Amino acid sequence: MTNLDKTSAKAAMRSFIEQHFDQQVDALARLVQCPSDNPPGDCTPHALVSAQWLSSMGFVVERHEVPTELAQQHGMHSVTNLIVRETFGSGGPVIALNAHGDVVPPGEGWTDSPYSGVVRDGWLYGRGAAVSKSDFTTYAYALSALKHLAQEQGVALQGQVELHFTYDEETGGLTGPGWLLQQGLSRPDYVLSAAFSHQVVVAHNGCLHLEITLRGKSAHAAWPDTGHDAIEACVPLLSALYRYSDGLAEHPSATPGISHPTLVVGLIKGGINTNVVPDTVTLRVDRRIVPEEVPEQVEAELRRVVAEAVVALPGISAEVTQILLARPFKPVPGAQALTELVCREGSAVLGTPVTPVGVPLYTDARLYSEAGIPTVMYGAGPATLLAANGHRADERVPLRELQLATQVVANVLLELLAA
């Protein structure tokens, strides 16, 4: 295919996307209107709605139900992941487009219902509108435009495009993309994972959650010296953790968009009653791991901080349990060429530079990259997560970027399958 042919093909796909954009917006509104909060993580009903919508677009939809016991081990009630496979010709790469349909609970402070899907002033509002139900439609309509180009205009393409719509990103992704890969249900050559429109995410932080339990000895509050106060033991432990946290700023990341490691004590729970010396207290710690760090070393550091803080406390013991380890997302061989392609196509469609960055979050993209698959993150959204109100009240996605990101993804697919 010549460059001129590609230009004409991209124009044809742009026209298709524009003609079907009202349908795309309606589809996104319906996806937002179907709750899929995680927790509690009962997301199979949303998967069935999504599957019905995809089927109505002419796709053959595979429903892959994660065994209930495994889903519950990962904090989910039910998980049904969806795969669509469209083959365009023998040979060529397999490209997966991954977005997640589970969302954080809405909380309070919304102008409209968090499940309204209302459109106002060029934005569509609702929980999941930006993270990342929008990219269900971005990817589905980009694939539909490519399929129309091949079938109706006879454009020869080689390779396969898969949609991976999964449902446990908010709890770590291990029963979503992690499970699909582990089960051998897919092994793509390239992956685009959900994100926003003005940057290409090529790296992100990892995350370590530790549960720290301090154990002492209960006693009557009238004779506190006969016990060992676990809450009092938290004082030197918290001081040690916060000193450690302050020192993390001295280790900046070299990845644009990522500052330095962080630590947050997000939960403290303990005590029996007001008149009892507490025998147990539990803390949950969130440690963000920058791409340059080694997760095992980070965990060893934190365990050492805890041990040193309590070693001199009489009658107090500490137990540290790993709750979550999400490794940092880093480029693998082959990712640079994919990054350059998405940046180039994004810049051409948006009319402004689209550049590679890192983000301090953690996502499902890491699971594909850990498997050695060149992966970048790109999808529909404004310049920042804050502008989208991600994980906050009045979450929203700009319709302009929804349409333009769909064009970008369609163009990227064309370039990869027409090469």
Image: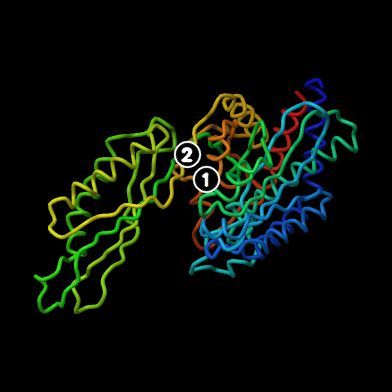
Q: Residue at x 60, y 42 (%)?
A: 182
The residue under label 1 is: 363
Q: CA distance from mark 1 to mark 2?
A: 8 Å
Residue 115 falls in which quadrant of the image?
Answer: bottom right
Left or right of residue 183, residue 87 in this image: right
Pointer 1 with pointer 2, Cβ within 8 A = yes
Name which of mark 1 and mark 2 comes first in the sequence.
Answer: 2
Q: Amino acid at mark 1?
A: Thr
Q: What percent of the width, then of the height, locates residue 401?
A: 64, 46
**Quadrant of the snapshot with the N terminus:** top right
Q: What percent of the width, then of the height, locates residue 137?
A: 70, 50
Q: Nearer the viewer, residue 28 or 86?
A: 86
**Quadrant of the snapshot with the C terminus:** top right
Q: Residue at x 29, y 54 (%)?
A: 319
Q: What percent of the width, then of the height, locates residue 355?
A: 54, 32
Left or right of residue 312, residue 4 in this image: right
Toward the top, the furthest residue is 2
Q: Amino acid at mark 2?
A: His
The residue under label 2 is: 204
> Dot 1: within a 10 Å radius of its alpha carbon, few (fewer than 14), some, or many (20 or more) residues?
many
Q: What percent of the width, then of the height, locates residue 263?
A: 32, 48
Left or right of residue 369, residue 270 in this image: left
Tell me the SS state at disc 1: loop
Residue 40 falls in which quadrant of the image?
Answer: bottom right
